[in-house]
Amino acid sequence: MKQKGLQNRQRIIESANQLFYQRGYNQTSFSEIADVAEIPKGNFYYYFKSKDDLLAAVIDFRVESIQVMLDDWAREIEDPRARLKRTLKILIHSEEEILRYGCPMGSLNVELSKTQLSLQSKAVEMFDLLVNWITQQMKALGHEDDSRALALHMLACMQGISMLTNVYSDSAFMRHEVAMLEQWLDQL
């Protein structure tokens, strides 16, 4: 694919990523994605044979973005506890989006788990990446035996915070709960 084709493909992925988050995978049409990406609808199938292929590309885009973020934190932050606290700050930095749409990873996984389990098995890669990251940080804090359980607990709390923040449209709740998780991390 030539440079312009790669740019068009990337615009489609980024547009679909935004729309899948804001509207949901099943509620978003190729036509809407093409409009947002400013790609002629007839050219859309040149880049993606199906909506499922596009979703796989969106998930790969999200996983890659998360990996870049985690790699940056590994370089910039020495202390594993500080890395975990930075992970919690994802909620605060995404406050406006979470208030309106919930968590992009959680909402996609829940939507797909209801009717499209094969697609959901791909979407779980985003969670796997974070669980593994948090597990590594817990091990670095000396929690070798229960590092994965602690990682799952932290991620479960983050997902619950996202969901309830969205349900009640309450950013004060989010900030309070993040502060409580930070205190929990300090006690580990």
Image: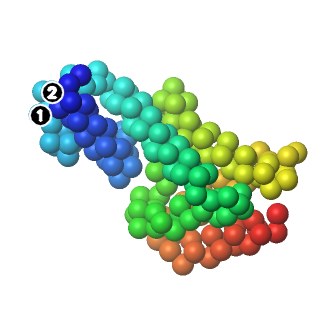
- Label 2, secondary structure: give it: helix
Left or right relative to 119: residue 185: right
- Please tell me whether mark 1 sits on a helix, a strand or a loop: loop
Q: Position of residue 186 (x, y in %)?
A: 77, 69
Which residue was labeled with disc 2? Answer: 43
Count of number-bearing discs: 2
Q: Residue 88 lies in what quarter of the image? A: bottom right
Identify the residue at the far right of this view.
Answer: 145
Contact check, label 1 and label 2, Cβ < 8 Å: yes
In this orientation, does residue 182 appear?
yes
Q: Identify which residue, 177 or 5, lies in the foreground.
A: 5
Residue 144: percent from the left, percent from the top? 85, 46
Residue 72 x %, y %: 53, 52
Q: Which residue is mark 1?
A: 40
**Dot 2, how many residues are within 10 Å of its Cα: few (below 14), some (14-19), or many (20+)?**
few
Q: Tell me if residue 111 can be seen.
A: no
Q: CA distance from mark 1 to mark 2?
A: 5 Å
User: Dot 1: few (<14), some (14–19), or many (≥20) neighbours within 10 Å?
Assistant: few
Q: Amino acid at mark 2?
A: Asn
The C terminus sits in image quarter: bottom right
Name the residue located 73 percent from the left edge and 46 percent from the top edge. 136
Residue drawn at x 62%, y 76% is 176
Residue 37 relative to residue 98: left or right: left
In the rendered structure, the answer to whether residue 38 lies left or right of residue 57 reads left
Where is residue 123? Give x, y as percent. Answer: 51, 36
Depth check, front residue: 176 or 166? 176
Q: Amino acid at mark 1?
A: Pro
